[in-house]
Image (cartoon, helix red, strand yellow):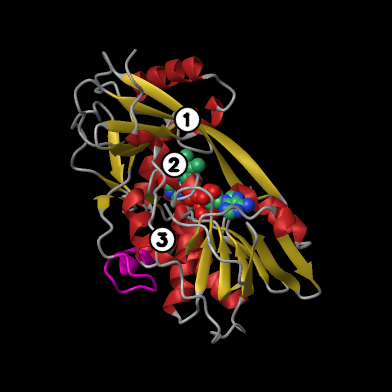
Amino acid sequence: MPHAPRDHSPILVDVAIVGTGAAGLWLANLFAGRGFSVAVCDPRPLGGVQTAAAQGLIHGGVKYALGKAERIDGVLAAMPARWRACLAGEGEVDLRGVRIVSEQMHLFSRRPGTKARALLDGLAAAGRARRAQAANTPPFQGGALFETGEFVIDVPALVRCLAARLRHRVIAIGVDARSVAVGPTGVKHLRLAGRELHASAYVFAAGAGNEALAGRVGAETEMRLRPLRQTCVWPSARPPPVYAHCIANPPGAEPELTVTSHGAALYVGGKVASDGAARNEAEQIEAVRASLREHLPGLDLAGATFKTVVVERAEPASGLGDAFAARRGNCLVCWPNKLSLVPRLGDLALAALADLRPGTAAWRGDADGIARFAAPPYACPPRRG
Ligand SMILES: Cc1cc2nc3c(=O)[nH]c(=O)nc-3n(C[C@H](O)[C@H](O)[C@H](O)COP(=O)(O)OP(=O)(O)OC[C@H]3O[C@@H](n4cnc5c(N)ncnc54)[C@H](O)[C@@H]3O)c2cc1C
């Protein structure tokens, strides 16, 4: 477990980052790679809250283009190539060793002659998707399957990779808003269990925790929380891997089901998860079971085990199309909005703190730091009672 600091002398770093989800860990790598000394604070295991629950889709916005095949947002569309460069060791953060678990995120529509099918055909005609060869392979039976060119990564492996270079830079303490000492130029220091953390710049990458921290420094950033009830399904026999958005008819603003495979588990998000925030676990399991029967009838759910988890997405109220970073004095408040947009958040953070120079009085780090990692929901099947 990462250690809390033991002595009481101030810790001095260039950049203090709050939060060890994908945003905080990415930014810490980015700044450390440029010669800045960093410290990252989080009371929870490394890997965040939303990040640990993420499905791992590095999307370029194709699902948002349903119904408007001619337009895919430019910022999102650039992200898969940015990630591929990093995965190949040629980007701004070296992600060699992080596995792509599926080269394709599919779009699937079961029923011919429907508006949903026409939309997918429209995407294909516009060059945004391609009819897949594997159309009739279980569990995709009797429908049309399209490849998007978007891919899925192993999120726990991403967290481990990002954390590898930060092992001694993690302080396992939460930053309460009241412990943020504020002065005329922004944050003076953070008080951490009797010890002060001083930095030239402070980055709040704390997901849902950002609102209180931003409020403390007077940054007027409104946050919204969007609860999702995600569902994990363990069929009694391991199904073939599924990485697909299942499109309902008529299609809605988001896919009815977004299904990803994680070992023996299928992990289900999408509209059924957004709607599921208003359901209890038993109701959600019934809704997901019915929806899987409808959209993926080739899946054998006899004897399957289900579990649901509620996770809140934390996003700036101003919009979702881009990552968000707002500077106030020496302080940066940021949300990536999507895992895919984390490289873009890196661009915004570096631009916002472009006047920052690596200092000389640097914390040497915690030599005893040992990382503890957040477990994703699909890693822990429920005990059969
Ligand atoms: C179910 C689900 C599935 C998703 N799937 C995808 C996907 O497939 N593709 C995609 O692009 N995006 C996806 N997303 C979105 C993506 O996961 C998030 O945008 C991203 O992970 C946010 O990262 P983060 O680091 O900002 O936040 P988080 O991962 O939530 O991390 C925030 C961290 O800050 C810490 N913290 C909070 N307050 C404090 C404090 N006061 N002091 C210290 N630490 C604090 C928390 O402990 C936490 O570790 C998904 C989100 C959810 C919820």
Mark 3 lies on a secondary structure that is: loop
Distance in Å between CA atoms under marks 1 and 2:
9 Å
- Numbered disc 2: secondary structure: helix
10 Å crowding of disc 2: few (<14), some (14-19), many (20+)? many
Q: Which residue is mark 1?
A: 309
Residue 175 appears at what percent x and percent y? Answer: 63, 55
Kindly identify which residue carries mark 3. 369
Q: Name the residue located 48 percent from the left edge and 68 percent from the top edge.
A: 28
User: From mark 2 to mark 3, how far is it between C-alphas?
Assistant: 24 Å
Q: Is residue 141 left or right of residue 347?
A: left
Near-viewer residue (352 or 196): 196
Q: Inspect the image, locate mark 1, and give the three-letter code of the amino acid beneath it.
A: Val
Residue at x 57%, y 86% (from the top left corner): 357
Q: Residue 159: image x %, image y %?
A: 38, 55
User: Is residue 184 left or right of 372 when viewed as pictured?
Assistant: right
Label 2, ligand 1: CB separation under 8 Å: yes
Give left or right: position of 313 versus 382.
right
- The answer to which quarter of the image holds residue 366 is bottom left
Magenta stretch containing residue 84, yes or no?
A: yes
Q: Give, as a three-letter code, the residue at label 3.
A: Gly
Bounds of the magenta segment: 79-95
- Name the residue tied to disc 2: 53
Q: Bin the neighbour count of mark 1 within 10 Å (Cα to Cα): few under 14, some 14-19, many 20 and up.
A: some
Tell me the amino acid under the disc marked 2. Ala
Measuring from the top left, give residue 302's x and y in whole percent.
26, 13
- Foreground pick, 181 / 162: 181
Q: Are marks 2 and 3 in contact (CB under 8 Å)?
A: no
x and y percentages locating residue 179 in the rendered image: 71, 58
Contact between labelled residues 1 and 3, with CB atoms less than 8 Å apart: no
How many numbered marks appear? 3
